Amino acid sequence: MRFALNQMGFPEEGLLENARLLADAGYDGIEPNLTADGPLWDDEFVEELADELERLGLDVPAISTTLHWERRLSAADDETRTAGLEAGERMLEVAEELGAGAVLIVPAVVDERTPYDEAYDRALDSVRALAASGADRGVTVCVENVWNDFLLSPLEFARFVEAASDAGPVGAYFDVGNVKRFGYPAQWIRILGEHVERVHVKDYRTDIDTMEGFTYPLEGDIDWTAVDETLAEIGYDGWITAEVSPYRTAPERLPPRLRADLEHLFS
């Protein structure tokens, strides 16, 4: 396995500073997020980042974003959906420049005003459009399971990925912690099988059982032995990327301590 940290847990402000910190802590990669006004929109900065990552010996497992919670790929109005597609296209551009093989996409958000079936159809069209662009750039569009009331079973998740894959490379970015409230992570991994392209890890406390229940690996209720064994069963030996919040106190201590825990869990 190769280990990375998502930008959500970075202790410093700048990507370059965090890249140096992660390299010192022994990580294999860094996963930056495309934000509304962040530096990944700047071509010159992306080139500078690529050079620094090469110097540090760090790779990029994927480009992620939270923009698709607002710029929804399943939105009924064309303007919102187009904004989401533009964000996705920029992620693909940055992924190609940084040598990342994947982008992380939130395909839809279902709510009181967005019927599930309509969201499904629009999300599928959007992911197919991005997959076609990804095929030209050698980048896989990875759909993540998140708390968006969408793709609520591994069977449906797998079918969605398969349906979108007719347009280009599409896979699952499986988040272990996001599943615990609704099912059993090892079962999802086994059913998704070869569709699993990337893995996010965090833990979850069922005694809290809300968004506040997310925590650091080894501090929740996930059966990590079952997760590790099932990943081996499906032949997964790729990226394990932690997606956790920084420590409230001494945040610079998170990366090395977390890196040691990842090695323990997936050695």
Image (tube, rainbow, N blue to C red):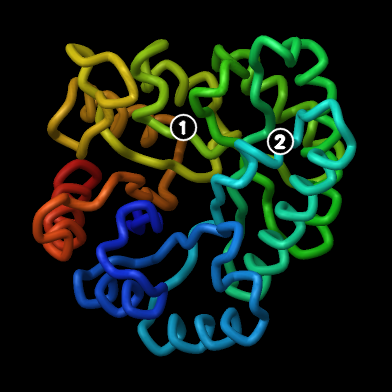
Q: Position of residue 60 (x, y in %)?
A: 49, 66
Local packing at callout 2 (Cα closer than 10 Å; few below 14, some 14-19, many 20+) is many
Horizontal side of residue 35 vs 180, given as left or right: right
Report which quarter residue 215 is drawn in.
top left
Percent x, y of residue 12: 29, 69
Residue at image location 53% in from the left, 88% down from the top: 48
Disc 2, SS? loop
Q: Amino acid at mark 2?
A: Arg
Q: Is residue 111 above or below residue 132?
A: above
The image position of residue 112, as x and y in percent, is 66, 10
- Please give left or right for residue 188 compared with residue 207 in the image: right
Q: Nearer the viewer, residue 249 or 197?
A: 249
Of badges 1 and 2, the one in the foreground is 2
Residue position marked by numbered label 1 in the rendering: 234
Q: Is residue 81 above or below residue 118?
A: below
Q: Quadrant of residue 111?
A: top right
Instruction: Place residue 170 in its image quadrant.
Output: top right
Residue at screen point 78% across, 48% down: 83
Find the residue positioned furthest to the right. Answer: 78
- Residue 214's disc number: none
Q: Where residue 227 sits: x, y (%)? A: 31, 28
**Number of numbered discs on residues:** 2
Of mark 1 and mark 2, the one earlier in the sequence is 2
Residue at 25% across / 74% down in the picture? 21
Residue 72: which numbered mark, if any?
A: 2
In this view of the protein, which residue sits in the foreground, 250 or 241?
250
Residue that appears at 74% across and 45% down: 84
